[in-house]
Image: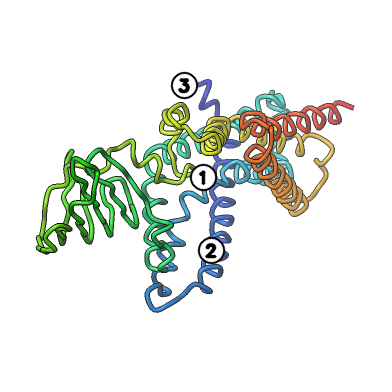
């Protein structure tokens, strides 16, 4: 425990870094919130009002925070160590026997804590919230058509539904039931279907018998052929998948393109902690290395430029993995090796 918490000097450095990461994260997420709101204003309509746009922007923040987490850690460590250096606390720590490695370890500990919180959120909290907000937005904007909805087939029926806010609720359901000769026998339409326990229930439905032409309306009916848990793996966007779901579905996927998408998201999330920690060490090299005489504003600008450049390169290599021979793992590893190379170079320059 003492190895992780450290003494008073280590705790002071760690707390400064943690508070800096929180402030930087709040600033970046606030900017992202503003830009999201501005982008949504052009889509306002009678059904999709300002309140809906605000709610969508708010519910999108957790995923945005997780997506920007590596760069938030980079700028946070850069700002915190830079301010400590300007205040002379880094020099005082050295006088009291702290080596550069001790100081770096103290600054990485809060990064590890933030990464753990991010990983847990990505596993349990973010997927459902993000999918729900995205589907609700598309529904209110009337952007989901028959071509954009979801189709599922079983031995006795073919089902279509317009939206799936989460794995326990689907909306605007149409069920085409087939007879033993696989000919259309019955068409059932329902406003929504909810999963309670292990069974689905259709609500506010109408059943049309193709042979007789008769119609009947029901308030509720059990839906035995409702989608199973694995069926939603084809519905949810891969970026909202948890790490365990990504790992599970990669080998089950038949489409090579979607398999590459799943692999790309899996390796990006699995290797994010390594990428973030390397960025934190790179940020520390700016304080101890050739950029140690920069003012705090210059350090922040350097961190923003570096984060922006790395983000562009990361997106570029990820796009190449989907359209070229580059494998998803290699596309994720290349930015990591770039950061590793920059870190080694920065610390070598420091030694001269």
Left/right of residue 96 with respect to residue 248 in the rendered view: right
Closest to the observer, 65 or 214: 214
Residue at image coords 69%, 23%: 97
Q: Is residue 251 above or below residue 212?
A: above
Residue at image coords 32%, 45%: 152
Mark 1 burial class by Cα count in 10 Å: few <14, some 14-19, many 20+? many
**Which is more foreground, mark 3 or mark 1?**
1
Residue 101, image x and y in percent?
69, 24
Residue with the mark numbered 2 = 36
Residue 235, image x and y in percent?
39, 46
Q: Is residue 62 visible?
A: yes
Gap in angstroms between the C-alphas marked 3 and 1: 27 Å
Closest to the observer, 220 or 8: 220
Residue with the mark numbered 1 = 66
In this rendering, the count of numbered labels is 3
Circle 2: element type: helix
Residue with the mark numbered 3 = 1
Mark 2 burial class by Cα count in 10 Å: few <14, some 14-19, many 20+? some
């Amino acid at each position: 425990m003492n190895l992780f918490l450290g003494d008073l000097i280590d705790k002071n450095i760690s707390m400064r870094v943690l508070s800096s990461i929180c402030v930087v994260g709040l600033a970046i997420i606030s900017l992202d919130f503003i830009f999201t709101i501005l982008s949504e204003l052009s889509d306002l309509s009678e059904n999709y009002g300002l309140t809906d746009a605000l709610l969508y922007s708010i519910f999108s923040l957790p995923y945005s925070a997780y997506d920007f987490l590596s760069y938030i850690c980079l700028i946070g460590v850069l700002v915190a160590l830079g301010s400590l250096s300007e205040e002379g606390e880094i020099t005082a720590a050295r006088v009291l026997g702290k080596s550069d490695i001790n100081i770096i370890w103290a600054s990485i500990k809060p990064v590890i804590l933030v990464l753990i919180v991010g990983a847990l959120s990505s596993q349990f909290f973010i997927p459902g919230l993000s999918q729900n907000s995205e589907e609700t937005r598309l529904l209110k904007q009337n952007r989901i058509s028959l071509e954009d909805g979801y189709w599922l087939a079983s031995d006795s029926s073919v089902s279509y539904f317009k939206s799936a806010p989460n794995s326990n609720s689907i909306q605007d359901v149409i069920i085409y039931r087939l007879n033993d000769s696989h000919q259309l026998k019955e068409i059932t339409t329902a406003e929504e279907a909810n999963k309670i326990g292990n069974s689905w229930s259709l609500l506010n439905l109408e059943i049309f018998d193709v042979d007789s032409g008769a119609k009947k309306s029901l308030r509720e009916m059990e839906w035995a052929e409702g989608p199973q848990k694995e069926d939603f793996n084809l519905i949810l966007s891969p970026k909202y998948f948890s790490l365990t779901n990504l790992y599970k579905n990669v080998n089950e996927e038949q489409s090579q393109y979607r398999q590459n998408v799943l692999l790309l998201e899996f390796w990006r999330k699995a290797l994010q902690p390594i990428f973030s920690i390397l960025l934190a060490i790179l940020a520390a090299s700016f304080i101890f290395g050739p950029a140690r005489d920069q003012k705090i504003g210059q350090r922040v600008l350097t961190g923003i430029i570096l984060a922006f450049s790395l983000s562009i390169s990361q997106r570029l290599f990820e796009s190449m993995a989907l359209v070229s021979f580059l494998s998803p793992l290699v596309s994720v590893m290349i930015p990591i090796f770039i950061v590793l190379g920059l870190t080694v170079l920065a610390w070598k320059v420091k030694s001269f």
